[in-house]
Image (cartoon, rainbow, N blue to C red):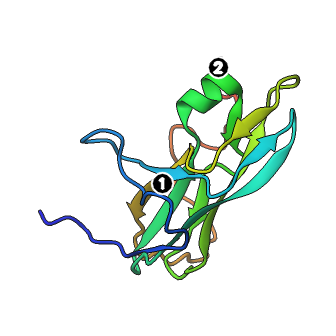
Amino acid sequence: MDALKIPVKRLDGSLDLPVRAKAGDAGFDLRAAVNLELLPGKRACVPCGIALGLPPGFAGLVLPRSGLAAHHGITVVNAPGLIDAGYRGEVKVILLNTDDQEPFAIAKGDRIAQLLIIPVPEVRLMEAPELDDTSRGETGFGSSGV
């Protein structure tokens, strides 16, 4: 199967284009285009220095990096962030420092999040007076136990 080719516009020529850290990885590393310090409990919208040309039928999901989350409490506020196929502006990541004591320094070029490109089927929602029964039914949050 041929690889899907997604155009990437480099908005900051000093930054590397997103790549997968290892062969077979799902996500592409997104890098910070600025230096900043993220204070405890604060968030920032961090530009990544690229724009994407996602084709119709695809979307980009911006996900946290597990190492930053585990070691520093850094996460993506709106995880997963969504990049729609029609968006052509700069990719930005809304980072949050969940640590209540330690600031976190981000240097230009640091890997701050991951980009996952996914197919999005054409879907039409249609009103229905009733829904089919399932084994779960209407049970919601916490219904499967701890």
Q: Amino acid at mark 2?
A: Gly
Indicate which disc residue 145 carries: 2
Which residue is at 55% across, 81% downward? 88
Dot 1: element: strand
Which residue is at 68% across, 42% downward? 106
Q: Quadrant of residue 18?
A: bottom left
| x, y percent for residue 74 | 69, 35
Q: Residues within 10 Å of mark 2 (few under 14, many from 20)?
A: few
| x, y percent for residue 43 | 82, 47
- Among the two numbered marks 1 and 2 on one chain, the one whose residue lies closer to the N terminus: 1
| x, y percent for residue 4 | 26, 68
Q: Residue beneath label 1, please?
A: 115
Most foreground residue, 47 or 115: 47
Indicate which disc residue 138 carries: none
> Which quadrant of the figure contains the C terminus?
top right
Dot 2: element: loop
Left or right of 115 in this view: 39: right
Which residue is at 63% across, 30% downward? 69
Q: CA distance from mark 1 to mark 2?
A: 32 Å
> Which quadrant of the figure contains the N terminus?
bottom left
In the displayed orientation, state which residue is furthest to the left: 1
Q: Residues within 10 Å of mark 1 (few under 14, many from 20)?
A: many
